[in-house]
Image (cartoon, rainbow, N blue to C red):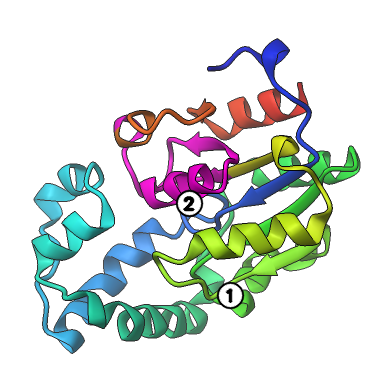
Amino acid sequence: MNDRAQLPRYDLLIFDFDGTLADSFPFFLEAFDTLADAHRFRRLDRSKIDLLRGLELPQIMRHVGMPRWKLLPVALQFRAMMGQSIARIRLFDGVRDVLRDAAGRGVQLAIVSSNSEENVRAVLGDDAALFTQFECGAALFGKRRRLRRVVQGSGVPGERVLCVGDEVRDIDAAHAEGLDFGAVGWGYAKPEALQARAPKLMFDSVAQMAAQLAG
């Protein structure tokens, strides 16, 4: 649904980070080969990237032969690798304006991410001060509890909260908490995979996100 006239006023925006605010997918692809070799699962077939973007995380793990118990050590190493190359990671064009506009209108901003708070703050720079809460280092399947903690800490009723992210697991966590979700089409997952989960909003571009959130 994209009719701004029917939208509630959102007083809290909870953002995912990688693929939503930060353009980290190219770095992820580079790092994945190193992680695959170190932890002995298959590298990503570059010819199948578009297909893989349509899969959910458990399906991708099965595709590369990664058992679930390896998720934590792989995630920790990925965060460390990104921290060493953090200067390469940038926010998507226009994202800073979206964040500043929302904060300027009195909307609370928060981040729930599996990345480290140190990495997130480094990429945000001075704009990290716009955020009232950081719930970082979340388990890849553990965002629901983090979302609940942010909402409780904000004092904002659930019907005035919008979660914004780029992966199916983000939508599932938000819906499990009864929260509206805005899916971004420029991140890790294909837009079709996100639309299949019926998000409240679907943003095809940062400019569209800016327009709808300001509406």
Q: x, y percentage for residue 144?
A: 52, 58
Classify residue 209 by image quadrant.
top right
Q: x, y percentage for residue 211?
A: 69, 24
Residue 131 visible: no
Q: Quadrant of the C terminus?
A: top right
Between 118 and 182, which is closer to the camera in this rendering?
A: 182
Residue kind at label 2, given as amino acid type? Ala
Residue at 48 percent of width and 31 percent of height:
199
Between 87 and 195, which is closer to the camera in this rendering?
A: 195
Q: x, y percentage for residue 19?
A: 46, 52
Label 2 near label 1: C-beta < 8 Å? Answer: no
Question: What SS does tag 2 mark?
Answer: helix
Left or right: 136 in relation to 47: right
In the image, is residue 165 above or below residue 36?
above
Residue 170 is a magenta residue:
yes
Residue 144 is a magenta residue:
no
Q: Which residue is mark 2?
A: 173
Q: x, y percentage for residue 210?
A: 68, 31
Q: Earlier in the sequence, mark 1 or mark 2?
A: 1
Number of marks present in the image shown: 2
Q: Which residues are magenta?
A: 164-192
Question: What SS does tag 1 mark?
Answer: helix
Find residue 119 and name its label: 1
Find residue 149 and name its label: none
Left or right: 203 in relation to 109: left
In the image, is residue 27 above or below residue 59?
below
Between 159 and 73, which is closer to the camera in this rendering?
A: 159
Residue kind at label 1, given as amino acid type? Asn
The residues bearing labels 1 and 2 have C-alpha atoms spaced at a distance of 23 Å
Residue at 62 percent of width and 12 percent of height:
3
Closer to the eye: label 1 or 2: 2
Residue at 63 percent of width and 58 percent of height:
148
